[in-house]
């Protein structure tokens, strides 16, 4: 059969190339089905790096929507709670240069804070409960509210809605369990040849 | 070549093919094929390693697939003049397959390699391997080894080169030579060094 086809070169060429095309097309179709990617795995990895305060300071309703936006190419410097450390980690993950924190979205807090409700002033309006992104405030209407300190991410979102201004952001006190040695100075002397001259 | 009486002879022949494709006829530095990813993906060691693995995979698979297509389809039908276009078809399919495979198995590598992954299709080293295999009349085993050797040689120089570029990025380089210029000079010196391997076998 091959000999008969080979007598008509143009027909042979057509059959060979079209046949190959169909064969590879079928193989690729099968591979596409087999190696189908569910969702976008890169979003998961970005989401893990974000601080999960769900504070919304980036302009998105939470950390995961922001992670999805980053995966689509949004700027990575909109997360004040994470600060420069988070920006650097995401930049490293995505292999892009690390920008400074965007001041438009807030400043990086120096110390970790936690919300504290002065309970004798609380009127029980539940406005802070609705504002809390991580559901760390307990209480009911006309009853005193209180903050679960372990759950509070220190995002400041409950301070603004409080009509009697009874919420304070207090620095988390350092206990013997959380204390650690201060990091060594970052400007350690490198090998002379590794230093780029500062222009 | 061809008449193999013992395993030892076969092994020796395979070793010769490997050494010659990795060092003596190195695809990048001696034959100057595949220079685009050599310059493009060599700024970071990690992505260079990923690119090396992907390209080696594609080269080996392409060498095998193009041999099969050449022997089973093109030769019996007298279509040897269609080798180039048929091999390009093979390469495109293999690269697309690799792309799907990497997207599934390592999304991070997929993102890091970015546009260079589909661009393996137009990497002339890949078509070079397929065409050289066909013109040298190598058998199936020799073809695959030649493809793998080409990939290993490509990986070797790409990883060396990216390691050097990482050092160069922080080194004190005169302003006119910064960036691509010093990289070109480095590549030239590496190429000179690899010319020294000629006559090894």
Image (cartoon, coloured by chain):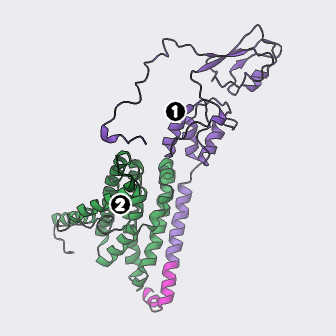
Chain colours: A purple, B green
Is A126 situated above or below B39?
above
Where is residue B93? Give x, y as percent: 48, 67
Q: Quadrant of residue B161?
A: bottom left
Is A68 situated above or below A23?
above
Q: Which mark is residue A85?
A: 1
**Residue drawn at 80 percent across, 12 percent down:** A143
A27 on left or right of B14:
right
**Helix, strand or loop status at disc 2:** helix
Magenta range: A1-17
- Rendered-image quadrant of the C terminus of chain B: bottom left
| Residue farthest toward the bottom in the current orientation of the protein | A7
Which residue was labeled with disc 2? Answer: B184
A18 on left or right of B36:
right
Q: Residues within 10 Å of mark 2 (few under 14, many from 20)?
A: few
**Helix, strand or loop status at disc 1:** helix
Q: Between residues A138 and B13, which one lies in front from this camera angle?
A: A138
One can see residue A39 in this view: no
Prevailing SS of the magenta stretch? helix
């Amino acid at each position: 059969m091959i000999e008969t086809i080979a007598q008509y070169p143009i027909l042979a060429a057509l059959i060979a190339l079209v046949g190959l095309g169909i064969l590879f097309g079928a193989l690729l179709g099968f591979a596409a089905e087999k190696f189908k990617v569910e969702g976008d795995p890169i979003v998961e990895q970005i989401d893990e790096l974000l601080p999960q305060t769900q504070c919304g300071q980036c302009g998105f309703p939470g950390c995961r929507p922001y992670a999805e936006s980053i995966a689509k190419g949004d700027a990575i410097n909109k997360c004040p709670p994470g600060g420069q450390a988070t920006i650097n980690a995401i930049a490293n993950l995505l292999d892009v240069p690390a920008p400074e924190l965007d001041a438009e979205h807030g400043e990086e807090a120096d110390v970790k804070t936690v919300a504290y409700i002065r309970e004798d002033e609380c009127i029980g309006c539940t406005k802070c409960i609705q504002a809390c992104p991580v559901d760390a405030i307990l209480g009911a209407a006309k009853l005193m509210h209180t903050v679960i300190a372990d759950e509070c991410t220190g995002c400041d979102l409950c301070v603004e809605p409080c009509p009697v201004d009874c919420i304070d952001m207090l620095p988390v006190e350092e206990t013997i369990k959380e204390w650690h040695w201060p990091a060594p100075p970052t400007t350690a002397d490198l090998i002379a040849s590794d230093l780029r001259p500062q222009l | 070549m061809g008449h193999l009486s013992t395993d030892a002879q076969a092994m020796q022949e395979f070793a010769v093919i490997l050494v010659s494709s990795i060092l003596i006829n190195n695809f990048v530095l001696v034959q100057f094929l595949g220079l685009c990813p050599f310059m493009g993906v060599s700024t970071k060691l990690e992505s260079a390693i990923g690119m090396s693995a992907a390209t080696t995979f594609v080269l080996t698979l392409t060498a095998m697939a193009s041999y099969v297509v050449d022997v089973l389809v093109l030769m019996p039908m007298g279509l040897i003049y269609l080798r180039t276009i048929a091999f390009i078809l093979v390469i495109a399919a293999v690269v697309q397959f690799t792309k799907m495979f990497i997207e599934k198995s390592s999304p991070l590598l997929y993102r890091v390699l970015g546009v260079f992954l589909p661009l393996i299709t137009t990497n002339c080293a890949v078509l070079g391997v397929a065409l050289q295999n066909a013109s040298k009349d190598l058998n199936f085993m020799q073809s695959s080894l030649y493809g793998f050797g080409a990939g290993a040689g490509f990986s070797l120089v790409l990883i060396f080169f990216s390691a050097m570029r990482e050092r160069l990025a922080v080194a004190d380089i005169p302003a006119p030579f910064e960036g691509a210029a010093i990289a070109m000079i480095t590549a030239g010196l590496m190429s000179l060094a690899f010319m020294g391997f000629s006559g090894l076998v």
